[in-house]
Image (cartoon, rainbow, N blue to C red):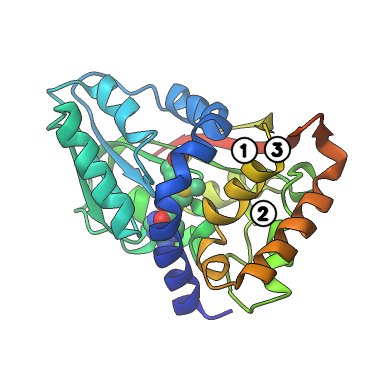
Amino acid sequence: MDPRLQRRVQRYGWDKAATYYDQYWAEQLAPAQDRVLAMAQIRNGEWVLDVACGTGLVTFRAAESVGPGGRVVATDISDVMVQRVTEIAAQRGMPQVTAERSDAEEIIQGDETFDVVLCALGLMYVVDPLRALEQMRRVLRPGGRVAVAVWGQRSRCGWAEIFPIVERRVASDVCPLFFQLGSGDALQYALARTAYEDIEVERISATLSYDSGESACGAAFAGGPVALPYSRFDPPTRDEVHAEYLTSIAPYRRGDGYEVPGEFVIARATR
Ligand SMILES: C[S@@+](CC[C@H](N)C(=O)[O-])C[C@H]1O[C@@H](n2cnc3c(N)ncnc32)[C@H](O)[C@@H]1O
């Protein structure tokens, strides 16, 4: 695994996926995002850092909770995601939201700045999640809270074949340890290793509903973590990977659509 390649695949892949992300993922990820926000218990006037913010699905809900007197800083490795959040903040008239490009492993904000750090479905993509958790702890004020969500155990995520299907065609280093934090007590252990306290962990089941094979493939390829290698496939290769992916989720076919099982692990802890 080449860490620089993995970061580039993330950065430029999510630039491409940004256009499709809300269409394919907003509804699917809502159960995990709801729990992250509930566990964070964000209060009016607080300062929040949203790491790996994507299009801001969590950012703007946090901004409602902090109100005009608080502050939400959204960061992401993808320029396009950061631009999107900046534009939405302007459209919605939410000056309490700002967005900047920053790698979760190299958070640019100063020590002890935030009351809350959020990271919804972002930690699986970073090269060194422990380093990212340490960085999140560094920018938390003493007593501040972190709330994170990751995908759960691989065997409970029915869409997991997407990675080998792509990697059989291109050595892409998409995210080699994607399901690592979702196994067993790994997330609890990672938080304890990075000196967090009062750790609470929940595991929840979810169903990813797609009304057609086309939307299942859109979410998996153009709108998700393999967007960069997928963008370089020629049309016959795209047809092949679509067919292989639909075969892998065939057990979850319901009529014209698919009801694919998924699992999330959500945790909160304090500094
Ligand atoms: C599945 S999206 C989650 C977005 C958002 N938190 C949500 O809940 O909708 C994953 C995001 O992680 C970002 N990401 C990947 N690697 C990253 C890194 N090393 N540092 C910061 N962000 C990263 C991607 O650019 C992408 O926007």
- The residues bearing labels 3 and 1 have C-alpha atoms spaced at a distance of 10 Å
The circle on residue 128 is none
Q: Position of residue 263 (x, y in %)?
A: 69, 37
- Check disc 1 and give the amino acid type: Val
Q: In the image, is residue 4 above or below residue 202?
A: below
Check the picture and name the quadrant holding the C terminus: top left
N-terminal of the pair, mark 3 or mark 2, is 2
Q: Residues within 10 Å of mark 3 (few under 14, many from 20)?
A: many
User: In this view of the protein, which residue sits in the foreground, 49 or 81?
Assistant: 81
Residue at left 53%, top 39%? 24
- Check disc 2 and give the amino acid type: Phe
CB atoms of marks 3 and 1 within 8 Å: no
User: In this view of the protein, which residue sits in the foreground, 34 or 180?
Assistant: 34
Indicate left or right for 232 with 79 as reference. right
- The residues bearing labels 1 and 2 have C-alpha atoms spaced at a distance of 11 Å
CB atoms of marks 1 and 2 within 8 Å: no
Q: Please give the residue where the numbered disc 2 appears in the rendered image.
A: 179
Q: Secondary structure at mark 2?
A: loop
Residue at left 53%, top 29%? 27
Check the picture and name the quadrant holding the N terminus: bottom right
Q: Position of residue 99 (x, y in %)?
A: 22, 47
The circle on residue 262 is 3
